[in-house]
Amino acid sequence: MTTAPDPGWQRLDPRMLLVHPVKELVRFLPVLLGLFIAGTASGGSGGWWNLVGVLIPVGLGVLRYYTTSFRVSASRIELRRGLVNRHVLSTPRDRVRTVDITAPPIHRLLGLTSVRVGTGTASTDEDEELSLDGLPVAQARALRTELLSSDPATAEAVPAEQQVLVFDPSWVRFAPFTSAGLAIAGGVLAVASQVLNSVGGLERLDPDRVVRDAEAWSPWVAVPTALVGLAVVVSTLAIGGYVITNWGFLLTHTAGAWHLRRGLLTTRETTIDDERLRGVSVGEPLGLRLAGGGRASAIVTGLGKGQSALLVPPAPRDVVHRAAGAVLRTDGPLDAPLTGHGPRARTRRYTRAVGPAVLLLVAAVALVPLADAPRWLPVLAALGVPLAAALAADRVRALGHALAAGHVVVRSGSLNRRREALDAAAVIGWNLRSSWFQRRAGLTTLTATTAGGRQAVTALDVPEPAALALAHAAHPHLLAQFLAEQPVRTTP
């Protein structure tokens, strides 16, 4: 007697029968290579073992399809998978925060997508992810609209999307000014070294010959040539990574949600509910700032592991500010003048930047007579002092805070400058923390805790009266009971 299937449960698209076996074969690739090598070494009797080794992951892929099903009801979304160990994930629909739609190349070839539902869970276990890997594109987008609709009865009434930002190919000029090129270059170098080591290339390398060849070059020619070559390689890799990740970037808005689409090989669509978006963070790392660029990300609640809050990739500064203002529905938090943190905060910036540089210079000078160090070492260390002073001055210019258009605004940093605008209504608590040195200077670090983004927005080295004034102005009823008298408001 066969049991009738539970009503409402659905399987993924049957085309996943072509995808799951391939993914399992890739996962078992090291084992299959071991079986192949062992079969070859045994004198040709490993043909059957190789066949069995291939059939096992293929069978697991097929079982994965037939043991996975999902159900979306008016109140819950459920995912069921597993044969021996049955695993059922179930979450209320009102817990859905974000919906990501991703299509790797093989999925795009078959017209499929992978839907990942973000519920705000803090779990990092992959088994706890509510992911529907293998839905047709149209069904995935309809499901996204349904899950993020506050009223399921109106989920079909989707308003026309309003385009906010469209990818401009000229933005690739900002790619070399990000750290992506260095990260990709490091990865490529690591893989290349592993490949050379596996084929014995490093063993055949003659260090003495390399040294002799290097001595034949003048340092005034070799160093600039090497630097230029490194810059070209890193820039090329950065541009390639930028294009693959952000090509086709499109930011749109409908009534109730923001939609972001990007990707050349793997397309990714992220949807953020308006009710979950709490603010915007505009980043201007040193390289992008010198090139007149920046980037922006959303401060959003319920963002799961691996989910992106990107709003604008590296792009011209005016483009970033225009898009961030559209998300905030006001330019006030982005253009508002900031209240500085005073001379004591400025002193701390210079002390913490210049102090280590001076100590390094003193150590370099002492090493010349004590350890017979080269005389150019103190000269090289002395160059760090003005660089540290310039870094401190830049950090002083960045430091500030404000309360503008109902948003708590803070800015700090130099190498990675960031201006964050957090909706004051999204602040769930204030934290004032002072080190021993800060207490002596009358300064404190003010942290606005929130459930969105990095869980906090922090203002560094704020004078204590100004920190209390900012927190009290944002939430008068929260701090009034702890204050002996009303603080003087120092922010507009």
Image (cartoon, rainbow, N blue to C red):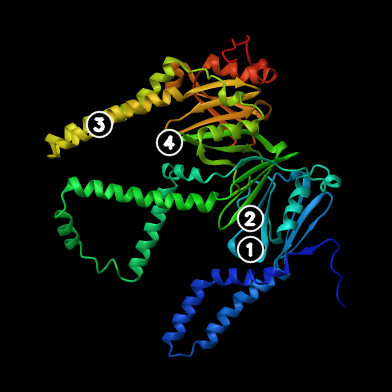
The answer to whether residue 431 is visible is no
Q: Are marks 1 and 2 in contact (CB under 8 Å)?
A: yes
**Which residue carries the number 2 mark?**
102
Please determine whether, in this image, residue 261 is positioned above or below residue 27. Answer: above
Query: Which residue is under mark 4?
Result: 291
* Residue position for label 1: 107
Q: Nearer the viewer, residue 211 or 30?
A: 211
| Residue annotated with mark 3 | 383
Q: Is residue 449 above or below residue 307?
A: above
365 vs 175, left or right, is left
Secondary element under disc 1, as helix, strand or loop, is helix
Residue under the image location 28 percent in, 32 percent down: 384
Q: Are the residues at dot 1 and dot 3 in contact (C-beta closer than 8 Å)?
A: no
Crowd class of label 3 (few under 14; some 14 to 19; many from 20; radius 10 Å): few
Q: Nearer the viewer, mark 1 or mark 3?
A: 1
Between 206 and 14, the residue placed more toward the observer is: 14
Q: Is residue 140 left or right of residue 309?
A: right
Residue displayed at 26% across by 29% down: 359
